[in-house]
Amino acid sequence: MHSVADVRTRAHAKPSSKPSPTPHPDHGARFARASDEHAKAGGLGMYAKFPAAPSVDPETGEIRGAEKSALLARFERFALQSAARRLLPGSRTSNCLRLRQKRSDILVMQSKEHGTCSYKGLQTCGSVWACPVCAAKISERRRLEMRSAIDRHIASGGGVYLLTLTNAHHFGDDLRELLAGQAKALLAFNGDRASRKVFADMDCIGQVRATEVTHGRLRRVNNGWHPHFHILLFAAAGVDLVEFQQRLAARWISACGRSGLKLPSLEHGVKLDDGKFAADYAAKWGLDHEMTKGHIKKANDGETPFDLLRAYLGDCDKQAGALFVQFAEAFKGKQQLRWSPGLKKHFQIGEITDEELANQQDDKAVLLGQITLEQWRHICKVEARTLVLELAEKGWEAVERFLDSIPPQPGGMKEKLCKA
């Protein structure tokens, strides 16, 4: 590996005669040709489907199949981001990791600890809902916060429980209206004196709420959008799950009725699980993952929003694409996790925004090289952002050979294309 400080890459030097390390010598050209075919296919052709067994990329937090390498996980993230860009033109996600930050150089950095490479000096959208790249990074940091709180509470002798709330819904229900109705019902539920009595009887010191949604278009009976709340309760250990589920169900059904929602059933409207759920739900899954990565994972029943994005990318599924747009528009600006007042302070967890998390850089990363605006324009055009990072992890000389192969662009690079 070559660690070169303050390297400035050459745009049009003669290609190096040295053999390429691992990548094939004409890897860049083949990638460009494949990218042209990708573009002709509407940007949806270069996508591989992966197994659904869950695991986590330790560097990025990406949920991936057990056989899926870190390289393929990164390729999927960037490919899904390009699909989201196509569906959400003009959004911040459409510019994420494409436009440079004002007055910043485009740099390639390498982590000393993991050996993985990343870009510095590019804009990030910080969208945990619509951007697969930012969502992976943000959700992993949020998962670590959640894991810390869970571990601290259990170590102090408490119990952690997952409360799931939903209501009846049908095909044709508008997602925005469902979310608004559920928000109203939740306000009534939390403000209800009887509900507060239930939580007090559980010795609940606080809660963390996440909103999740799936779609049922692939089920035998398509019931449309299925938004629901996951609420992590930090309470006493060993509570009677059956008793408290029944008491909470009565209060939630009442709140839904007062809010004009279709009433949930006792069987499906409320579910209360204890910490053992983390072990039983899936071998490598836990409550911290369930709370922070629900929209990213592959659903066992129905489709998550990112399942819809995968279907659009992999199968040119226009219906899936339209549904993803509905989701992105309905969830835009919404907070993914809402902690009870004072709960983060109780567990000594600091406050940081999603956008700040998306912009965080590895303090121990070293500079490998710099990419010119003209080179970056070509890299984005042929969808080679992941290729450059792959080559950088083999050594900066491999990146230089690829960049040297870039033909001169007529008229040069327009600065406005890369400015904020």
Image (tube, grey):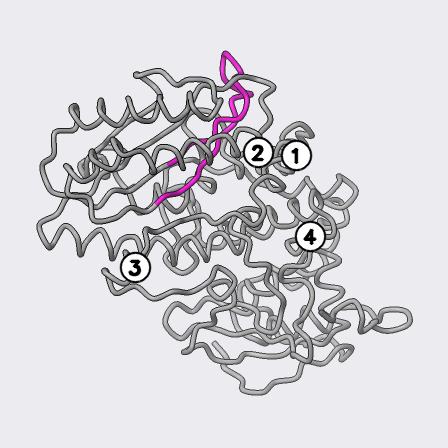
Determine the CA span between mark 2 and mark 1. Answer: 7 Å
Q: Nearer the viewer, mark 3 or mark 4?
A: 3
Determine the CA span between mark 2 and mark 4. Answer: 19 Å
Picture coordinates of residue 295, whole percent (x, y): 47, 40
What crowding class fits label 1: few (fewer than 14 Cα within 10 Å), some (14-19), or many (20 or more)?
Answer: many
Between 172 and 125, the residue placed more toward the observer is 172
Determine the CA span between mark 1 and mark 3. Answer: 37 Å
Q: Are marks 1 and 3 in contact (CB under 8 Å)?
A: no
**Mark sitting earlier along the chain (3/4):** 4
Along the horizontal axis of the image, is 267 left or right of 154?
right
Q: Nearer the viewer, mark 3 or mark 2?
A: 3
**Mark sitting earlier along the chain (2/4):** 4
Picture coordinates of residue 293, whole percent (x, y): 41, 45
**Mark sitting earlier along the chain (4/1):** 4
Element carrying mark 2: helix
Q: What residue is drawn where x is 74% and y is 71%?
A: 419
Labels in figure, total: 4
Q: Which mark is residue 136?
A: none
Q: Are marks 2 and 1 in contact (CB under 8 Å)?
A: yes
Q: Which residue is mark 3?
A: 344
Identity, as a three-letter code, of the amino acid under mark 2: Leu
Q: Nearer the viewer, mark 1 or mark 3?
A: 3
Q: Which residue is mark 1?
A: 321
Q: Which residue is mark 4?
A: 91
Along the horizontal axis of the image, is 166 left or right of 393?
left
Residue 163, picture quadrant: top left
Element carrying mark 4: loop
Identity, as a three-letter code, of the amino acid under mark 1: Gly
Identity, as a three-letter code, of the amino acid under mark 4: Ser
Queried whether the magenta region covers residue 219, the answer comes back as yes
**Mark sitting earlier along the chain (1/3):** 1
